[in-house]
Image (cartoon, grey):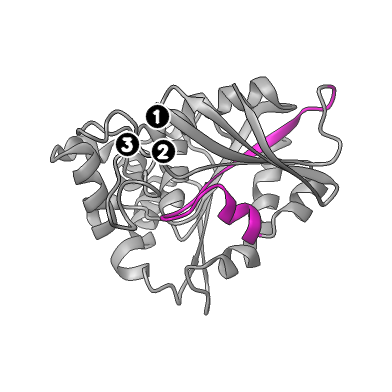
Amino acid sequence: MLENISSVKVSGGWHKQYTHSSQSTHSTMRFAVFLPPGASETNKVPVLYWLSGLTCTDENFMQKAGAFKKAAELGIAIVAPDTSPRGENVPNEDSYDFAQGAGFYVNATQAPYNTHFNMYDYVVSELPALIEQHFPITSTKAISGHSMGGHGALMVALKNPAAFVSASAFSPIVNPIECPWGVKAFTGYLGNDKALWAQYDSCELMKNAEQAHYLPMLVSQGDADGFLQEQLKPENLVAIADKKGYPLTLEMQAGYDHSYFFISSFIDQHLLFHHQFLTA
């Protein structure tokens, strides 16, 4: 059952937060939804799902990205889930890059995380079904995200190409099996089976993508991002895309870092990118 915990008018539309009991994560989850002006049961709108990065909640993107004005103009809803299950009964670590706030959008197989940390099922199946049931939103959807959420967006799209019309990311972790953040998270959630890790790695997934299932992707990356070389490695994904002829565009932006200052500078471009496919 959905509980509306906030409702604020913005850019002619509405930003609302909800909590609900999740079957995937066995916890109370929170998400935010932006409904553009004119959205109604007789005028349902397409949706962009946004997956946030480490330490974030549903609030970071909605408060800092500056996306509402352009989304309202284009008639696009935005849904932003939390980044992990939370609560007293949910395992946690004294660490920003693992456990609560750091779900990495995988289904954990290792105790004690496998009971609650099933964020892949949550964002792929449970949340979209909930959204389409309770809001004036169609099943036509795109997906985007930042950092850990950029990993999530590209990975989810590559694993479910029929479910999304397009995917984009800001500063994504494209090759988590080859970077410290990813190795730590995947070891903790998935154990030492590298074959299981590969199922959640965008580079590995793109290597195996079939041309009939390609979907357009846009990646924005700041060249002053302090995590660029050690954690993000966009060149790894670009090399695979170039070899396979995958429709991926990487835009390196001079002087920008890893923050929401960067995201807010280019969010309109991403919304326009998705709009052409959401309304095709």
How far from the left and from the top, in percent, is residue 238? 40, 56
Q: Residues within 10 Å of mark 3 (few under 14, many from 20)?
A: few
Disc 3 vs disc 1: which is toward the camera?
1
Q: How far separated are the C-alphas under marks 2 and 3?
A: 30 Å
How far from the left and from the top, in percent, is residue 3? 63, 29
The amino acid type found where label 2 is placed reads Pro
The one of 28 and 108 positioned closer to us in this rendering: 28
- Magenta-highlighted residues: 42-65
How far from the left and from the top, in percent, is residue 241? 40, 50
Picture quadrant of residue 128: top right
Look at mark 3 in the image and give the residue it sits on. 208
- Mark 2 or 3, nearer chain start: 2
The kind of secondary structure element at disc 1 is loop
The one of 85 and 237 positioned closer to us in this rendering: 85
Is label 2 in contact with label 1 (beta carbons under 8 Å)?
yes
The kind of secondary structure element at disc 2 is loop
Is label 3 in contact with label 1 (beta carbons under 8 Å)?
no
Q: How far separated are the C-alphas under marks 2 and 1?
A: 6 Å
